[in-house]
Image (cartoon, rainbow, N blue to C red):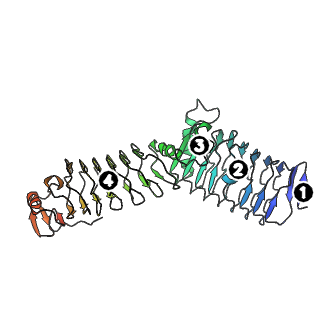
Amino acid sequence: MPFTIEDDVLVAYHGSEEIVTIPAGVQAIGEGAFRGNDRVRRVQMDVDVFWILPEAFMDCTSLEFVTLLDTLDEIGDRAFKGCRSLKDVDRTIADVYYCELKRIGDEAFAGCASLKKLEYESGRWLTVGSRAFADCTALAYVALPDALAELAHDAFEGCTSLRYVSIPEVFRGSEWQHGVFREAVQAIRNCCPNIVAIEGRGRASVYSSETKSPWSTGTLSRAIESLRNPSMSYVDFADKRRVGDVVGLFEGYAGLEHLDLTDFDTSGEKSLACLFKGCAMLRSIDLSPLDTSAAEDMRQMFFGCKSLEEVDLSCLDTSRVQTMAHLFHNCHALRRASLHGLDLLRVNSLWSAFDHCESLEDLDLTVSAMPPVKKTGYLFRGCTSIKRWEVSAAWPVRHDTIPAPTSKYDKWWSTREQRWMAVSQIVKRGPAADVFTSAPTELTNTL
């Protein structure tokens, strides 16, 4: 036999097979039993296995899959260290809803560069040791159990791809030690430079038994909720699962500086009202991933985004939108905005859309379709810096839909007619595609 077994402990493996099944009755994989084996790719364990002792599979560079059943009690120090081909730990440790695992030892999975995720939501009180997942450079997200006893401050050191972590807000014995969770969060941030969201969960009752991922509907919203911490500045979305009601989803996240909306599913959403309202530090945003084909309400979508400098709406489907009231109200740093090609045929309100955008210099109003909107009051109130604006024939040219001139002549220079024109002259001329500037030689770049 290729195994040496002593007192129910698999002491050594001598074979060269790629797929290994641990014999029935073995209760522990001994220290260094498979260490340095570069042949084995898959290990199937029996329900009798309770312990994986230190360095049991260390430096098994070809090992890809290990079946660890719910009876497993401990993964020892450096047990899988250097197993650079080992993949999804969640599919081996947490295929069942409830696990017995109590300890993941120091450097247990250190250097497992192919490991992408860890899902372990429920089970015994778990201790995660020092550098347990150090240098797992492909590890993207982690969900640790609600019954978490201890998490070493350097458990995820060098996990440069780690983006999401879901951990309980209260650790064992720390109900009166409110700083424990904050310290754990800060430690993860220090170890993982690309972390984007840390979700603080309650106890196991938070999840129903059918919940398989901390990023499924409902729990992703709670992950985003953690961004209220002012030190959190970035968020993106790891999968294409839906969030649900997105009205005001990011409202008030004052520390949020950047959003990657790739795979943020807004299909079917009728209202995007207040979506980014109050994101005072948001500086840039790419809206192209958004599906707005069902959107009817874009009120206050960017209200109070005081640091936002450029916005291009031309990528959005606005064919069903009925209101854009207060769209960019109080976006004090906004310099350039584009509504190029938008179908605004159903829009009935642009009330205060650019109200108090004092820095706005370049504005593209070349919409493809637009009705004679009635509610356009205060559309450009406080816009005292506009140097260039472009309009299409579809734009309803009225006194209340034209920015106030900022030139010393109190007129706009018409690129089309090559002459200075007062607002009343532009209105009298009627709708026509044109570019207006505050001076003949002052032509800024378009978006």
Viewer-side label of 2, 4:
4
Looking at the rendered structure, the secondary structure element under dot 2 is helix
Other residues around mark 1 within 10 Å, as few (<14) / some (14–19) / many (≥20): some
Looking at the rendered structure, the secondary structure element under dot 1 is strand
The answer to the question of whether label 1 and label 4 lie on touching residues, with beta carbons closer than 8 A, is no
Q: Is residue 312 left or right of residue 215?
A: left
Say whether disc 2 or disc 1 marks the residue closer to the N-terminus.
Answer: 1
Q: Which residue is at the front of the view, 110 or 303?
A: 303
Other residues around mark 4 within 10 Å, as few (<14) / some (14–19) / many (≥20): many
* 37 is higher (above) or lower (below) than 171: below
Q: CA distance from mark 2 to mark 4?
A: 48 Å
Looking at the rendered structure, the secondary structure element under dot 3 is strand
Q: CA distance from mark 3 to mark 2?
A: 17 Å
The residue at which mark 1 appears reads as 4
Q: Amino acid at mark 3?
A: Ile
Say whether disc 2 or disc 4 marks the residue closer to the N-terminus.
Answer: 2
The residue at which mark 3 appears reads as 167
Other residues around mark 3 within 10 Å, as few (<14) / some (14–19) / many (≥20): many
Looking at the rendered structure, the secondary structure element under dot 4 is loop
How far from the left and from the top, in percent, is residue 142? 60, 50
Q: Amino acid at mark 2?
A: Ile
Q: Is residue 197 left or right of residue 321?
A: right
Q: Which residue is at the front of the view, 436 or 299?
A: 299
How far from the left and from the top, in percent, is residue 179? 55, 35
Viewer-side label of 2, 1:
2
> Where's the N terminus, which quadrant?
bottom right
Question: Residue 219 shows which numbered tag?
Answer: none
Q: CA distance from mark 2 to mark 1?
A: 25 Å
The residue at which mark 2 appears reads as 93
How far from the left and from the top, in percent, is residue 440? 14, 67
Say whether disc 3 or disc 4 marks the residue closer to the N-terminus.
Answer: 3
Q: Amino acid at mark 4?
A: Val
